[in-house]
Image: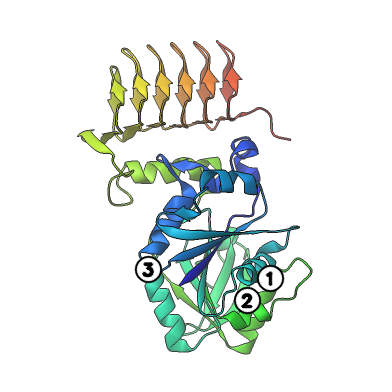
Amino acid sequence: MKAVVLVGGEGTRLRPLTYTTPKQLLPVVEVPMLERVVSALASHGVDEAVLSIGYRPDAFLAAYPEGTVAGIRLSYAVEPEPLDTAGAIRFAAEQAEVQETFLVVNGDVLSDLDVSALVSLHRRRGALATIALTPVEDPSRFGVVVTNEEGGVESFVEKPPPGRSPSNEINAGTYVFEPEVVAGIPGGRRVSVERETFPALAAEGTLYALCSDAYWLDTGTPEAYLRANADLLDGTRAGPPAPGAQEVAAGVWTMEEATIEGTVRAPSLVGAGAVVETGAEVVGTVVGAGGRVAAGARVGRSVLLPGALVERDATVRGSVLGHRARVGAGAVLDPLTVVGDGTEIDAGSRLAGARVPAVA
């Protein structure tokens, strides 16, 4: 089975990280998000994925020069202009010459959804399209999907007022499509699958949905990105947090050639070649490959991307440091500060909730 993976967004909510790295290539506990998404599909029979790309196609080509990811063949559909969700699906499906039932997934959503069960329902109902749904506590921030007893979609309610939602089930961003759906998407303009395609299919009675309470997370904000890492570290999602990780103490993981001279407390991971120096303390954090936490530094509930450096006596709390970012001696970063790739924070600085460099 083929899958269209939507990776076209610019990741504006995760800037400045996404100025240099597309959101789907940001690591989640040392594994690019895209690889986590695609490897999950492989276990459900997907053997080919076409990436629908609108932003920084060069980054994806450089990341996967051999045209494979997680053992799945890759092809690329680079949009000549923004086409919105349905337009992007049509463009990618045509580029990949999709002629049978296929999947569509968002490349920035991490999920343990049983995709095989979704496909099975789709085929039993003879649907043209089937949507995965997930329950949320506060549906007022999302588009709510209303279904009947057979799973047929009856209506969509966009961001209902708090306490007045007809359902708490929202679009989870994984779909099963028949080629006929692609043929029905208008060409040559932006088309939204949520606002145009799905309502039209629902009106025809050919759209179904399946709700699952499996793990689901949209990683599009710094808070969610931190949670995606934490959920792998603390066991919310089962299994080792990264391939090859070794548990050296309860909830403390290392990759090869990691060096821990200071204190590392669970749940944490110290990446390949990374160093936590004597007198440093790391708690609930990913220290990416080649990173370093210097003597006297304190890092908690944070993510340090590969090559990031926290100098002597600095403090980083609930923040994200980009690739090769550097926090100067004695600086203090409080939640939710996000530091871009290669950016230096001056010694002694105090930041809280900052984006550095500043986001336009």
Q: Nearer the viewer, residue 142 or 324?
A: 324
Looking at the image, is mark 1 or mark 3 earlier in the sequence? 3
Among the 4 quarters of the image, the one containing residue 286: top left
Q: Nearer the viewer, residue 77 or 327?
A: 77
Most extreme residue toward the right is: 188
Amino acid tagged 3: His
Around disc 1, counting alpha carbons within 10 Å, would you say few (fewer than 14), some (14 to 19), or many (20 or more)?
Answer: some
**Disc 2 marks which residue?**
198
Q: Earlier in the sequence, mark 2 or mark 3?
A: 3
Q: Write down the quadrant of residue 162 in the picture.
A: bottom right
- Residue 59 can be seen, yes or no: yes
Q: Residue at x 38, y 73 (%)?
A: 116
In the image: residue 77, left or right of residue 233: right
> Foreground mark, 2 or 3?
3
Rendered position, 280 above or below 247 = above
Give the structural element (helix, strand or loop) at label 1.
Answer: helix
The numbered disc on residue 195 is: 1
Cα distance, mark 1 to mark 2?
A: 7 Å
Q: Looking at the picture, which amino acid does disc 1 mark? A: Arg
Residue in the picture at 51% in, 79% down: 101
The CA span between labels 2 and 3 is 24 Å
Say which residue label 3 marks.
Answer: 44
Q: Residue at horizontal 63%, vertical 35%?
A: 16
Q: Residue furthest front?
A: 66
Give the image location of residue 360, x and y in percent.
Answer: 74, 35
CB of mark 1 within 8 Å of CB of mark 2? yes
Residue 325: x, y in percent?
54, 24
